[in-house]
Amino acid sequence: MRVSRSTISWLYVSPLMFVLIPFFVLPILVVLVASVFETDGFGGLIPTFTLANYATVLTSGLTFNLYLATVKFTVLTWFFTLLLGFFVAYFLVFHVRNPLLAIGLFLICTVPFWTSNIIRMISWIPLLGKEGLINSALLRIGLIREPLEFLLYSGFAVVVAYVHQLTIFMIVPIFNSMARIDKRVVEAAIDAGASRFDIMRLIIVPLSKSGIALGSIFVASIVMGDFFVTKVMSGGGSASVVSAFYEDISVLQYPGAAASAIVLTVVLLAMVALILRTVDIRKEITR
Amino acid sequence: MAVKDKSDAGKSTKGVSRRSLLKAGAAVAGAAIGTDAVTGFPTIWAQEIKDIELRHVGVSYSVVKAIGDQAAKDLGFKVTMQNLDTSAAINRFITQPNSVDIADLEGWQAKLAAKRGVIQGISAKKIKEFDNFLPIFTKGELDGHKIPRQGISPYEALYIEKPDSTDLHDGVTEWLTNVPQVYNADSIGYRPDLVGHTVTQWKDLIDPKFKGKAAILDVPAIGIMDAALCFESAGLIKYGNKGNMTKKEIDFTCDKLIELKKAGQFRATWTTFDQSVQLMAAGEVVIQSMWSPAVAAVRVKQVPCVYAPVNFKDGKEGYRGWCNGMGLMKHLTGKKLDAAYEYMNWYMSGWQGAFVSRYGYYSPVPSTAKKFMTPAEYTFWYEGKPAPEPVTDPYGVPMEAAGTVRDGGSFVERVTNISCWNTLMDESAYMNKRWNDFKVA
């Protein structure tokens, strides 16, 4: 029996479709439908077609402030994870001569991932608090007279926790793309008289682009879609896009929350599309 | 577990106590397995009750595993306690009603659940202790004192007209939305050593003296009431109904909160019991809105902490009350429904009442809870008198030394000073939006 080529193609994509359709496409369709319904105020949905929920979300000053707060955390987290992730990967690939040692050190980078995200976040609290380790130590050695309050329940604490949680998402893809760089290219550059900075600028960064892009997608979409770290580490002092519609759900305002969720999805898709436009990941990976 | 079994005392005074009956029932149930010989008690039968599982779902401070375990032991069927936070719970009751058997409902949740038709009316006649319920719940009064109805009082949320009515009924009927099981009056917790004076007014929470050292509850629906109590106490505004504000009142309250936040009044806001304990015990705050057992939990860590008695003064102050009750989901029928009634009757028979009393909450039927408490415990927790002997928590951990007096005084003094009840306002969507303005400010 001959199997046609198109059947084979379908068979190839079917595992992915079995995951994506029930766990992504269908739920998002449900949310999409809910977002154009009306609510009766008691958790009931009235099946009509209205764009009022979107109008409310898109014209509200609250939405703007929430996105501002969320984007601020996203950009800061992205910047610091990129900085750390890039140089950690760079060190592992170009400075550790023994490949076995490099792989070993790389695995050590993943050790924090053996504990839960929540534990890793919460363990910052006793460290950063008013009577925490850092403040106590600084007070003891006389560097400060009053405990530093900005350390905990602040934007600073939120960024620290995110960076701690997400740097690995930068390290892994950047390490991966750097490891593919042909070392002879670097040697040739040195022979041709390039400075370290030139090598970094003209060879390493361009050839790590796909890793940077992948890492950025991971970090940005995780921070944009999270609310728990913001809530806990800011001590409830800040909010995010997701925390706001989570609160809507708690008072059963499903359509409004659904509209916010769709808007966020669109924003994220646009962001990812923008990143993919700058870096052709498919080409880079298969190169 | 240091829980005194008082069934003997009950037996001597009243012939056969409910608990000994339950024990006998369990024994019969045990004996019946294998012999098929079943006689008398209870209304559901030995072989079959083993296979019954009741899923009681609700918040952690109300749906407690130790209580479910004891119920399972006494009743002979399986009880599973599942904890969710308030908002996840109401969402589950409404969107997946069949995944729940007993819904643990606050008054406003009972109203919503009835409205959505996910619960069935409970026949008051089948609740054995119903006549012994405190009239706070059944009539909306206590010792002739009318219990305020700002917010949704337990009385207001108790009755529906017919078993399948979707609207609450004002006035006594035979059908209940829920069987109240645990309640309390919330106020402020503070560090007496750092605040420097006795706190009896909500306005201390927004006193600039405690700038950067105060915290407030961040569950919008009830946090806004704590804020309202503060602003009313400070004489900034007089609310028509703190539990159901107008848009204008919501605006005033949230604008004021934003102003306070920008001035640096709040060190943090908290959403869970543990967070509030952590904030106080770690020295982050010296005053915050707080729950009674959380204050006790701070004291267990050897950090001084007092639960402020905020009795009415000049028409201001008062506690924010809450009450959780058990609702029967609509899908319960036959033996499972019988088991659910058995379960609710077990709750009211005293063991659970005594258990929750030991961490500072109250039972709606103190007369049965009393039978399961030592006289010393009852004196301390309910009568507001100095503890004749050291007091332990429900798990036997020492809590208070002999001679300690409970903060806030006696039970009657506390509940008659409740000024509003946990609620969901008519303008909740708007309130939520404004609360988020406060959060992101």
Image (tube, rainbow, N blue to C red):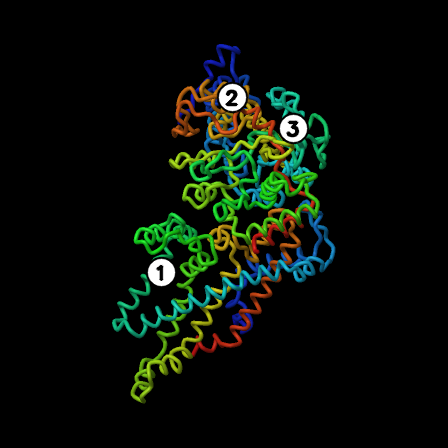
- Relative to the observer, which residue lies in front, B300 or B174? B300
Three-letter amino acid code at disc 2? Glu
Which residue matches tag 3? Answer: B147
Q: Of tags 1 and 3, which is closer to the observer?
A: 3
How many marks are shown on the rendered structure? Answer: 3
Which residue matches tag 2? Answer: B383
**Relative horizontal placement of residue A61, taking residue A161 as reference (left or right):** right
Q: Are marks 1 and 3 in contact (CB under 8 Å)?
A: no
Q: Residue at x 60, y 36 (%)?
A: B106
Q: In which quarter of the view is residue B178 placed?
A: top right
Secondary structure of the residue carrying tag 1 is loop
A156 in relation to B101, above or below: below
Which residue matches tag 1? Answer: A110
Q: x, y percentage for residue B116?
A: 68, 41
Q: x, y percentage for residue B220?
A: 59, 46
Label 3 Cα crowd, 10 Å radius (few <14 / some 14-19 / many 20+): many
**Relative horizontal placement of residue A66, taking residue B278 as reference (left or right):** right
In space, the residues marked 1 and 2 are separated at their CA atoms by 57 Å
Label 1 Cα crowd, 10 Å radius (few <14 / some 14-19 / many 20+): few
Q: Residue pushed farthest bottom?
A: A192
- Relative to the observer, which residue lies in front, B431 or A189? B431
The answer, for residue B322, to whether it is visible in the render is no
Q: Are marks 1 and 2 in contact (CB under 8 Å)?
A: no
In space, the residues marked 2 and 3 are separated at their CA atoms by 19 Å
**Relative horizontal placement of residue A97, taking residue B363 as reference (left or right):** left
Secondary structure of the residue carrying tag 3 is loop
Three-letter amino acid code at disc 1? Thr
In space, the residues marked 1 and 3 are separated at their CA atoms by 58 Å
The C terminus of chain B - image quarter: bottom right
Determine the chain carrying the residue at label 1. Answer: A
- Relative to the observer, which residue lies in front, A146 or B325? A146
